[in-house]
Image: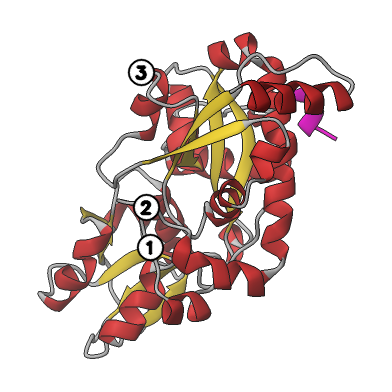
């Protein structure tokens, strides 16, 4: 402990700034692919060497990220943009600490099985679409691409199905298509011959922000130096996401016990990757809030700039 404390304060002094308020930060993480740079950076000691101990808390599919955050089970949480902005609209003050993942081609998609008659996105007037949350990122982006194909958004029947039950729902014809993200898409293709009916990162949702890390405003106000340091180190971690070869090699070992969407070597080599921003971009994130507003998920337009630390705004 003495050696660890000496190391910690030495690095803080070298940085020429007061030490952070906390030496340990608990970060709730979900989808392995979207959180891969953070996971790999924690595993290889990047945060520890930078003067901050990060403890990763695995969030199960049934966990509510916002509840984990507001109940102080974690200090920073990973969640999709729809979850974050819905929470803000419902009165939970949040501060975005960084973006996790931006969609690339086929990193989120509407998927069908090989024997499906649903081969034309606009062929059904009222398609039944499996989504993990009726008011989540899946319904938001699926509605956008279906609208572009001429389908009345109000006619879409969104059926709530967990990711691990979507292939079964397709096989039993309880739904016409399923909204999946990676690595679920690649796993469905590899194991069940699934095909992509429509890329949900296309048109209005091309290069769409999928997820981010956030803290409560109260925690941020009490721990500004801790979160400044976290964002600085997170940016370094995210920069590693540009090395797709290294990222793919690290994916199979990136998931902890109970992690969401863990992958094997073959799946890791095949998944469609998006990008990993090194800082929160308010203009990019605003696209999520504006699409939510236009789709009726937000009753009033949300100004995302107010949720991003000033240092992140250029």
- The quadrant the N terminus occupies is top right
Q: Could you say which is closer to the camera, residue 203 or residue 10?
A: 10
Residue that numbered label 2 is attached to: 139
Q: Is residue 46 magenta?
A: no
Asked where in the image residue 215 lies, by quadrant, the reply is top right
Task: Point out the residue furthest to the front here.
Answer: 2
Where residue 190 appears, as percent x and y from the top left, is 34, 84
Where residue 127 appears, as percent x and y from the top left, is 26, 67
Q: Could you tell me which residue is drawn at 57 percent across and 60 percent down?
A: 103
**Mark 2 and mark 1 in contact (Cβ < 8 Å)?**
no
* Vertical arrangement, residue 295 with respect to residue 124, above or below: above
* Numbered tag placed on residue 262 in the rendering: 1
Left or right position of 121 against 112: right
Q: Could you tell me which residue is drawn at 29 percent across and 78 percent down?
A: 112
- The quadrant the C terminus occupies is top right
Residue that numbered label 3 is attached to: 71
Mark 1 vs mark 2, foreground winner is 1
* Vertical arrangement, residue 242 with respect to residue 56, above or below: below
Q: Is residue 310 magenta?
A: yes
Asked where in the image residue 224 lies, by quadrant, the reply is top right
The span shown in magenta is 309-314
* Vertical arrangement, residue 178 with respect to residue 209, above or below: below
Task: Point out the residue furthest to the bottom here.
Answer: 115
Earlier-in-chain disc, 2 versus 3:
3
Considering the numbered disc 2 on the image, is that residue within a helix, a strand or a loop? Answer: helix
Where residue 180 appears, as percent x and y from the top left, is 37, 65
Left or right position of 124 against 175: right
Q: Could you say which is closer to the camera, residue 313 or residue 271?
A: 271
Left or right position of 124 against 120: left
Considering the numbered disc 3 on the image, is that residue within a helix, a strand or a loop? Answer: loop
Considering the numbered disc 1 on the image, is that residue within a helix, a strand or a loop? Answer: loop
- Tell me the distance, in whole angstroms, between the alpha carbons under discs 3 and 1: 26 Å
């Amino acid at each position: 402990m003495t050696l660890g404390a000496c190391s910690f304060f030495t690095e803080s002094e070298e940085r020429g700034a007061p030490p952070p308020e906390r030496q340990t930060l608990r970060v709730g993480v979900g989808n392995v692919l979207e959180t891969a740079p953070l996971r790999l950076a924690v595993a290889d000691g990047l945060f520890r060497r930078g003067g901050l101990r990060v403890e990763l808390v695995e969030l199960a599919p049934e966990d509510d990220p916002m509840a984990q955050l507001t109940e102080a089970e974690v200090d920073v949480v990973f969640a999709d943009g729809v979850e974050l902005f819905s929470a803000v609209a419902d009165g939970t003050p949040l501060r975005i600490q960084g973006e996790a993942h931006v969609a690339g081609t086929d990193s989120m998609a509407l998927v069908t099985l090989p024997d499906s008659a649903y081969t034309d996105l606009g062929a059904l007037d009222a398609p039944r679409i499996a989504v993990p949350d009726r008011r989540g990122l899946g319904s938001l982006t699926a509605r956008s691409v279906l609208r572009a194909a001429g389908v009345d958004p109000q006619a879409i029947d969104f059926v709530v199905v967990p990711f691990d039950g979507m292939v079964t729902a397709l096989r039993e014809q309880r739904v016409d298509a399923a909204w999946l993200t990676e690595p679920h898409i690649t796993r469905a293709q590899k194991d069940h011959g699934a095909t992509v009916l429509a890329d949900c990162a296309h048109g209005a949702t091309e290069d769409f922000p999928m997820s981010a890390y956030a803290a409560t405003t109260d925690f941020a106000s009490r721990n500004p130096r801790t979160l400044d340091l976290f964002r600085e180190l997170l940016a370094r971690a995210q920069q590693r996401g540009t090395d797709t070869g290294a990222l793919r090699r690290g994916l199979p070992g990136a998931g902890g016990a109970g992690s969401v969407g863990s992958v094997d070597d073959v799946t890791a080599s095949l998944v469609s990757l998006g990008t990993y921003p090194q800082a929160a971009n308010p203009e990019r994130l605003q696209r999520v809030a504006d699409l939510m507003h236009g789709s009726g998920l937000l009753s009033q337009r949300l100004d995302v700039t107010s949720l991003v630390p000033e240092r992140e705004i250029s």
